[in-house]
Amino acid sequence: MLSHKYTSMQRVLENVIRDTGFTEEIDFVESIEWAYRAMELIGAPQIYIEKVTDGNRDLNHIDPLIVEDYRTELPADLHHIIQVRSYGNKEALTEAKNSFHSSNHMSDEGNTIYTNYRIDNGWLFTNFKDGALEVAYYAFPTDSEGYPAIPDDERYLKAVESYIIERTGRKLWLKDKLSREKYNALEMDWLFYVRGAKSRTQMPTIDGMESFKNQILRLITHPDRHSHGFIQQGDPEQLRVLKNRFGRTG
């Protein structure tokens, strides 16, 4: 499990330069791109920041997304969506599986039964013309200057650093400035550290395991959790024992 603390890209590059001696070989812009790619390859959803488009400035949330003419632009820092609902009546939307979603708009005479959406090229398309949306999503972690923030965990840091080193070494090898043997060593380091980072992120917390246990150990199922934003999903089930007029339970 990760500590949910973050460190700067500057610290990552300082570690890379210290460990390799590379100075002019390190390109800052390319290193940022490689850091993002390394985090994607590690593939741990808990490294991203949970945000909601509810206008909460204290949490650095943007305003609700305004739907105009059946579409709205998604936030620039979005990694992937958790859930979407109407900002006004809090009605949960579902992801469209309709082949003709683009032409299945609400008419002026009446409403469709279900509201849904689809994502295409940075835009969210709805089957209603106008409105406001509250979108819960995972965002790329960034620092105050907009550079990627890296989880402050030793295994994770080493994985990101080793990927930047491996990518830099590959460029040098292709230009005949680094031997194949040395590049192989850099590649093996990356493959070793990425496995360590993956295993680190897959370790659940005790509280997380308790929530998961509460989700599966239930006598009564609740198939409507989605419409309420999965509130109380990880809470334990409360069973009430009723007594009849003879004082017996049943």
Image: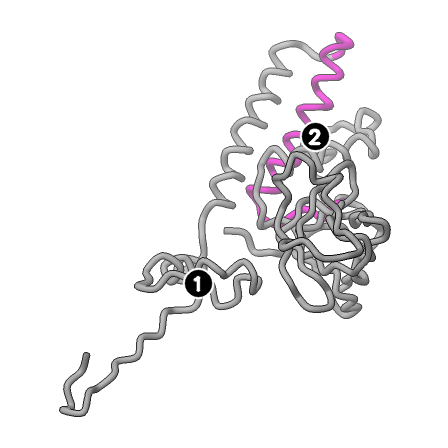
- Give the structural element (helix, strand or loop) at label 2: helix
| Comes first in the chain, label 1 or label 2 | 2
Residue 205 image position (x, y, % from top left): 45, 57
What residue is at 49 percent from the left and 60 percent from the top?
224
In magenta, the rendered stretch is 148-177
User: Closest to the observer: 58 or 105?
Assistant: 105
User: Closest to the observer: 21 or 108?
Assistant: 108
Mark 1 vs mark 2: in front? 1
Q: Which mark is residue 164?
A: 2
Q: CA distance from mark 1 to mark 2?
A: 34 Å
Residue 203 image position (x, y, % from top left): 45, 48
Instruction: Label the magenta part by its dominant secondary structure.
Output: helix
* Residue under label 1: 207
113 in relation to 31, above or below: below
Residues at circles 1 and 2 in contact by the CB criterion of under 8 Å:
no
Q: Please count the marks in the image.
A: 2
Residue 45 image position (x, y, % from top left): 58, 46
What residue is at 73 percent from the left and 23 percent from the top?
168
Name the side, left or right, on which 28 lies relative to 96: right
215 in relation to 184, above or below: below
Name the side, left or right, on which 16 lies relative to 213: right
User: Closest to the observer: 95 or 2?
Assistant: 95
Q: Quadrant of residue 165?
A: top right
What residue is at 54 percent from the left and 26 percent from the top?
191
Amino acid bearing label 2: Ile
Instruction: For the C terminus, give its image quadrant.
Output: bottom left
- Give the structural element (helix, strand or loop) at label 1: helix
Q: Is residue 94 visible?
A: yes
